[in-house]
Image (cartoon, rainbow, N blue to C red):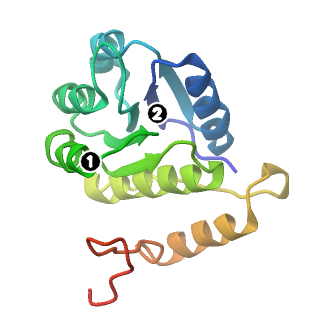
Amino acid sequence: MSTKPGYRIVCVDDEPAIGRALRRCLQRLGIEVLTYTDPRQCLQDLGSLNPDLIISDLRMPELSGIQFLAESRQLAPGASRILLSAHAEREGLIRAINDAGIHRFIEKPWNDDELMLTVFQALKAKRYETGSQVDLGIAITASSGIDPRVEELMRLEKETPGISRVELDEDGYIDLSR
């Protein structure tokens, strides 16, 4: 699967192995992926990077993911944000949504196909928010190694925007009333 050139994702996680795993996974989309282990260094570089999407770990020693993503809003206001964590508490997630403006939370360990679909949806939402006419140009190939169910979700999402979004109630059950 590939996208047209120009999309850039910045990933921040204090564990280098996580950054490498994110890059390996997301480069399958044909997107430029930059990884950082130091959130402060990333903040210094962010203004010149012009990312479309920022992915950050929640718990990092120097700066929490929520603080990092909140500060990144000033430096890259047009970027979507995704928060990753193996340890998430409800209060922290609510604060992240409000303070850092995250698009989505993904639990570690993640499923590669779900992560790619989430990134696809975030980039697509950004495209619609900005009114960009640039097509994501996702071309799914048999050699991509992506689960056929995810390929089908991407196809359906491209044809009917929003079809793959699911609303959950406060207990985590699907909310059909919306």
* Front-lying residue, 161 or 98: 98
Q: Quadrant of residue 62?
A: top left
Residue at disc 2, secondary structure: strand
Of callouts 1 and 2, which one flags the residue occurring earlier in the amino acid sequence? 2
* Front-lying residue, 72 or 63: 63
- Horizontal placement of 81 versus 157: left or right? left
Residue 135 seen anywhere in this rendered image of the structure:
no
- The single residue placed furthest to the bottom in the displayed view is 177
For residue 48, above or below residue 133 = above
Marks 2 and 1: in contact by CB < 8 Å?
A: no
* Front-lying residue, 160 or 70: 70
As shown in the figure, which amino acid type bears the numbered disc 1?
Leu
- Nearer the viewer's eye, disc 1 or disc 2? 1
Residue at disc 1, secondary structure: helix
Q: Residues within 10 Å of mark 2 (few under 14, many from 20)?
A: many
As shown in the figure, which amino acid type bears the numbered disc 2?
Ile
In percent of the image, x 32 and y 51: which residue is there? 103
Dot 2 corresponds to which residue? 9
Dot 1 corresponds to which residue? 93
Q: How far across and down, in percent of the image, does residue 79 sit?
A: 31, 39
In percent of the image, x 56 and y 76: which residue is there? 156
In percent of the image, x 51 and y 71: which residue is there? 157
In percent of the image, x 38 and y 49: which residue is there? 105
For residue 42, above or below residue 13 = above
Number of numbered discs overlaid on the protein picture: 2
